[in-house]
Structure formats: C-alpha cells, structure tokens
Amino acid sequence: MKLLIAPDSFKGTLSAVEICNLFLKEIKGLDIAAIPLSDGGEGALQSIIHTSNFERIELQVFNPLFQEISAYYLFDKKQKTAYVELAVASGIALLKQTDIMNASTCGTGQLVVNALEKGAEKVVLFVGGSSSNDAGLGIAAALGIRFYDGRGETVRPTAKNLTRILKIDRSHSLLSKYNAKLLIAVDVNNPFYGKTGAAYVYAAQKGASNAQILFLDEALKHIANIFYWKYGIDVQKIKGSGAAGGVAGGLTALFNAEIIDASNLIFSLLKLDEYIKNADIIISGEGKIDKQSLNGKLLVKLAGLVKKYEKKLWVICGYFDGNNQLKQALNIDKIFALAKNTDELPEAISAPKERLKKVINELLIEFLEL
C-alpha cells in the first residue's frame, strides 16, 4: 500500500516541511511520498518551491514595525510570474511582541516592487499569517499610492491612522506603470468589516484589545467608504476581502486585483490530484481540528479530493476538539492527536517533534495491521 504525507503546518510549532521530513525519517521500508501543503499562509512558498524552475530572490525589506530584515520571493522567468508570501515580510511570526495598531504590510509591497522591476507581468500574493490590520495600504504605499488627511498632509497608512485618510492619489501606481496583474490568494471568505470581518475575527490573535477591535472595525468601514466614494467599489460585497487584515479588499479596490483561492492554486501547482490517485492512504494534518475546520480551509478541500478518488484520509493534529459527527463531516477515517486532552497541550506545544514521533509510531502500527 502507498502512503501520501500531505500536511499543513502546525501553526507556531511545526512547519509542513518539518512534518514531512520527520515522517520520511521515522518510516522506512514503505512506499511513501511526502508533499508539504499550505493554505496560502505561512509556508506557501516552501510548499510550491519545487513545482517549477523558480529563482529565489532575496532582498532587504521592512518587517511589520519598519525594521530591516531579509526576505524573499519566487520568480518564474518563463511565465514572468512572481509568487510573494505576505508572511515572509509582514507576518505575525516575525514579531516577538505584537503591535497591530502600528504594524504595516509595507515590506510585502517592497517585495512586489522588486518583482515588477525584475520583469514580472503577474504577481501572485499569498496573504495568510498577517500581523497587521492596515487594509493592505502599506503594500499600496510601497507601490506608489499616496494617502492624505483633510489638510493635504501625507498619512502613513498603519491601522491607527486609517480614519485620518480622506484622499487617495493613485497617479503614481507602479502596477499601472509596469502594466502588471495582481492576484490575491486567500484562504478565508470573511468580508471587510463587521462581526465576521477582518477586525472582529482576526485582530485579537494579533494582540488587539476589545477597544482596539472596535476601533479597527470602524477604521475598515471608513476606508471602505472612501473606496466606494472615490472608485464606486463596495469591498464589503467582495468575498474574502477581509483576508489578512483587509489586504485582499484594499488591493482589489486600489489595483483592481483579483481574489483567488490559495489552496486550489497550490493544489494545482503541486499536481496533488495525481499524487492522491496513486496513493491508498493520505495522511494530512493541521494544528487544531474543531468546528472552524469546516470553514472552507485546506483540510476540507483536501478531504473532498480524497473522497473524489475513494481513498482513505488519516489526519494528525495537535488537538482534536470535536466528535464523530465532525470527523464524518470532514471525511476523516482516523485521527491521531499530539495532545489527547487539554492537560497534554503544554507539552505538545513545547515539544512537538517528540510528540509527533510517538504519533507516527501509533499510526504505523495501525497501518501495518491493515
């Protein structure tokens, strides 16, 4: 029987690449293939890097708090397409301490600018894992867009300043200058603002207080109104516009960017269908499986493919917070958890590799009994 290891990352503990490597190290003598997956957040470029003859381009850019760091993107010269991952330059994992009010996506914009200068005619931007709530205006500023207050003074477009913006100047847009297309690869369907929008759903995990969440939601509503008054675009009606602190909506309004599904793109680049066809059991995983896992994320899409080809899906997770009904809804045949209960969570988080090794052995025993 053939095994396919196709996990997402365990956010904050193990990358998908680390999980694949550990499986290959621990399991010997079996027919096994391993492909690290990503939902478009952290690890997207690692997932696709071997799918084409990419040039890895490194440069110095700003991190979310305007400190210089080394970052990279992938460039396909033949297709004249650049693949940029927001988390590489503007991700929450880059910060020791979160500061959502001042965090910016400017560094990601610097990566896009470099790609345009290298000759990219299309830029695919994976936007998961953001540390900010700036509606993508940091990216836009790097790409030549200028923002002004009521006095005509320039505004640095961080989250705390969004409500000051009353005028936008797109006349120096570098995307227009280079006649390039921008695609925003998202893994969520959230609207721009409101109870299911960017601030209410995601700002708390970026360090925002309740009072800041209320302010950020109003700030996004303000920017949405500016977009509508100036360009006639209602970003609130655009599916997925709330992704990454409103990056998807902001860039759609300012650059006519197209929002696409990140998981579907990654699956296509990896030719995942072919791997699933040739396997008997697919082993995937993500950090936590609960009701939120049903919201169109990577595991749901993978489970659909596995079901399509009538294969078995085994899943490893950090913790399973669900029941048999959830398991059936996700088309999962077997679940293996690093933490069997909440008491084991601290150890699973602090020593994930050791826990994963034990789970791999459990899984291997069940596999050999088939």
Image (cartoon, rainbow, N blue to C red):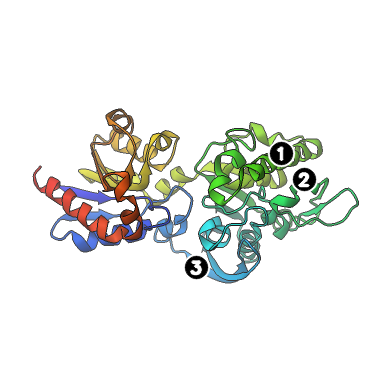
Measure the C-alpha gap from mark 3 to mark 1: 39 Å
Residue indicated by mark 1: 218
Measure the C-alpha gap from mark 2 to mark 1: 8 Å
Residue 322: x, y in percent? 33, 34
Residue 301: x, y in percent? 39, 38
Q: Nearer the viewer, residue 55 or 9?
A: 9
Q: Is residue 280 left or right of residue 141?
A: left
Residue placed furthest toward the front: 343
Mark closer to the chain start, 2 or 3: 3
Disc on res. 41: none
Q: Nearer the viewer, mark 3 or mark 1?
A: 1
Q: Is residue 316 left or right of residue 217?
A: left
Residue 129: x, y in percent? 52, 52
Quadrant of res 310: top left
| Rendered position, 226 above or below 115 | above
Quadrant of res 43: bottom left
How crowded is the residue under tag 2: few (<14 C-alpha within 10 Å), some, or many (20+)? some
Q: Secondary structure at mark 1?
A: helix
Disc on res. 163: 2
Residue placed furthest toward the top: 325
What type is the residue that disc 2 sits on?
Answer: Thr
Asked if marks 2 and 1 touch (Cβ < 8 Å), the reply is yes
Please name the residue shown 8% across and 44% down the image. 369
Q: Secondary structure at mark 2?
A: helix
Please name the residue shown 33% across and 29% down the image. 329
Q: Is residue 216 left or right of residue 169?
A: left
What type is the residue that disc 1 sits on?
Answer: Glu
Quadrant for the C terminus in the image: top left
| Rendered position, 138 above or below 212 | below
Residue 153: x, y in percent? 87, 56
Measure the C-alpha gap from mark 2 to mark 3: 38 Å
Mark closer to the chain start, 2 or 1: 2
